[in-house]
């Protein structure tokens, strides 16, 4: 039997108040529906701390609060949470979360059914939507995800389609067997990097019947914010592990293509400088 008390959740915040996190609010509703509670690490990557004690209760969530002003990225947060429960026999699962996903009320109910139906599977994921349509899971091709028009719940091979970070439920054992998250890949590619590691030992995952909607907008017009985001993209493409020279070419093209797209969109050339600094120059320095 799957029990919510065997799950430890890790929620990563950045420049968002805890009470404004749609992920937190929707999980609370799902816990109310399941009549249960959940232990959670809230890992704040923002420059400034929030006024919370180290341990506190928030409705049905038992929260451990941690602040890292250096913003180590998603991998640092997820690995920190995993290390906290590594020796705890009562915690069997990690639930990985971002801050802005609204999950269906039946999230835990559908997850429980999936885990009990497929006891040998180590990775479970909800179907996630944004303003365009399904964005997770996605077809995996040339080291990136491509949207699917539809996908039904069930078992899928990680070589064919891949889920993103938010809402991933993974067994603690499999998490450590995969070598945890690559902390050099802070944001973009962090989930793909982890899947690359995991599929070598656990090649399949289960898409549950749970649904999530992410507040994900591509309408940002602030060039400085776009450029900062692009710098993380370049760093992720630079630091992700490579298995062949072809991998290096693909990641180079992905980063360069993103820079061209942003330059065309904003009519600014700053993105080419960012590409050179955060991908080309730093790539040479790391080799």
Image (spheres, rainbow, N blue to C red):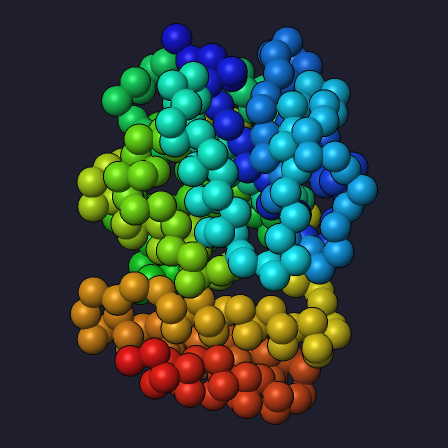
User: Residue 207 placed where, x, y %?
Assistant: 40, 32
Is any part of residue 146 visible from this angle? Answer: no
Asked if one can make out residue 132 in the rendered structure from this viewpoint, the answer is yes
Q: Which residue is nearer to you in this view: 51 or 122?
A: 51
Q: Is residue 228 above or below residue 144?
A: below
Measured along the vertical axis of the image, is residue 7 above or below residue 162? Answer: above
- Tell me if residue 268 comes above or below residue 253 in the rendering: below
Give the x, y percent position of residue 209.
48, 25
Locate the N terminus and report the quarter of the image it occupies: top left
Residue 28 occupies quadrant: top right
Residue drawn 55% across the image and 89% down it: 273
Q: Residue at x 59, y 35 (%)?
A: 41
User: For this view, does 163 lie left or right of residue 23?
Assistant: left
Q: Residue at x 75, y 56 (%)?
A: 48
**Residue 31 pos. (x, y %):** 64, 18
Q: Quadrant of the C terminus?
A: bottom left
**Quarter of image, res 237:** bottom left
Point 43% across, 57% down: residue: 183
Spot occupied by residue 99 in the image (x, y as percentages of width and height): 65, 44
The quarter holding residue 94 reads top left
């Amino acid at each position: 039997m799957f029990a919510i008390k065997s799950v430890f959740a890790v929620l990563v915040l950045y420049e968002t108040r805890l009470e404004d996190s749609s992920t937190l609010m929707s999980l609370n509703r799902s816990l109310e529906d399941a009549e249960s509670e959940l232990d959670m690490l809230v890992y704040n990557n923002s420059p400034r701390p929030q006024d919370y004690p180290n341990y506190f209760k928030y409705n049905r969530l038992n929260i451990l609060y941690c602040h890292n002003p250096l913003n180590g990225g998603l991998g640092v947060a997820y690995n920190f949470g995993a290390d906290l429960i590594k020796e705890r026999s009562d915690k069997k699962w990690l639930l990985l979360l971002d801050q802005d996903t609204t999950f269906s009320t039946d999230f835990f109910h559908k997850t429980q059914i999936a885990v009990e139906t497929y006891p040998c599977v180590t990775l479970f994921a909800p179907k996630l939507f944004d303003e365009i349509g399904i964005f997770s899971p996605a077809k995996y091709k040339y080291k990136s995800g491509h949207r699917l028009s539809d996908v039904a719940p069930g078992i899928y091979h990680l070589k064919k389609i891949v889920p993103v970070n938010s809402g991933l439920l993974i067994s603690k054992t499999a998490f450590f067997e995969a070598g945890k998250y690559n902390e050099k890949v802070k944001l973009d590619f962090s989930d793909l990097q982890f899947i690359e590691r995991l599929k070598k030992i656990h090649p399949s995952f289960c898409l549950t019947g749970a649904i999530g909607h992410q507040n994900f907008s591509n309408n940002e017009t602030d060039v400085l914010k776009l450029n900062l985001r692009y710098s993380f993209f370049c760093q992720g493409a630079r630091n992700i592990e490579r298995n062949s020279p072809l991998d290096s070419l693909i990641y180079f093209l992905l980063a360069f293509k993103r820079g061209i797209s942003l330059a065309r969109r904003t009519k600014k050339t700053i993105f080419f400088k960012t590409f050179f600094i955060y991908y080309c120059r730093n790539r040479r320095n790391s080799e």
